[in-house]
Amino acid sequence: MPPVVPPFLVGLIVAPLAKRLLKPLVGGVVKASVGIAMEVKKAAHEAGENIHDLAAEVAADVVAAQIAAGETEGHSVPGQHASGAGAKGDRRAPKIRATAESVAGKTH
């Protein structure tokens, strides 16, 4: 029959060895995880900026198309003076010209 070794003696021998082996391993895993998390955060931020820029460009294009459509229609409107002001009683809202910067807001 083999000799019986008390479990606490095994723990006294294995614990320092496990600490020496596991500490660098766990440290490497944590370091890699933090690096990956930082890269994912950076990629998500860049993707958000690209989507914001794309939305601003599309909004500017839509506004430009509306302005162009309003200018072509505006020349044949009866009762409108050369200054662009309508006749008395004209209830239409004034046309607002927008630029890409005003639609997108201030960037960076």
Image (tube, grey):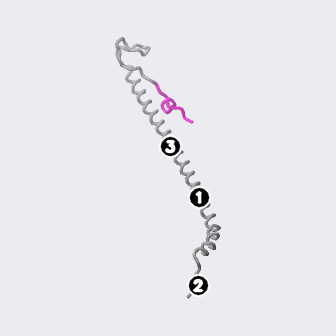
Select label 1 or label 3 by which is in front. 1
Tag of residue 3:
2
The picture places residue 65, in percent across and down from the top left corner, at 42, 30
Lower sequence index among marks 1 and 2 = 2
Ranked by sequence position, the earlier of labels 1 and 3 is 1
The residue under the point 62% across, 64% down is 23
Name the residue at the bottom extreme.
Answer: 1
Amino acid on which disc 1 is placed: Val
Front position in the image: 53 or 25:
25
Label 1 sits on a secondary structure element that is helix
Marks 2 and 3, how far apart at CA: 66 Å
What residue range appears in magenta?
97-108
Mark carried by residue 89 = none
Report the disc number at residue 30.
1
Q: Hey, what amino acid is under mark 3?
A: Gly
Which mark is nearer the camera, 1 or 2?
2
Percent of width and height locating residue 58: 45, 36
| Mark 2: amino acid | Pro
Residue at the limit of the structure toward the top, as seen here: 88
- Measured along the vertical axis of the image, is residue 24 above or below residue 61? below
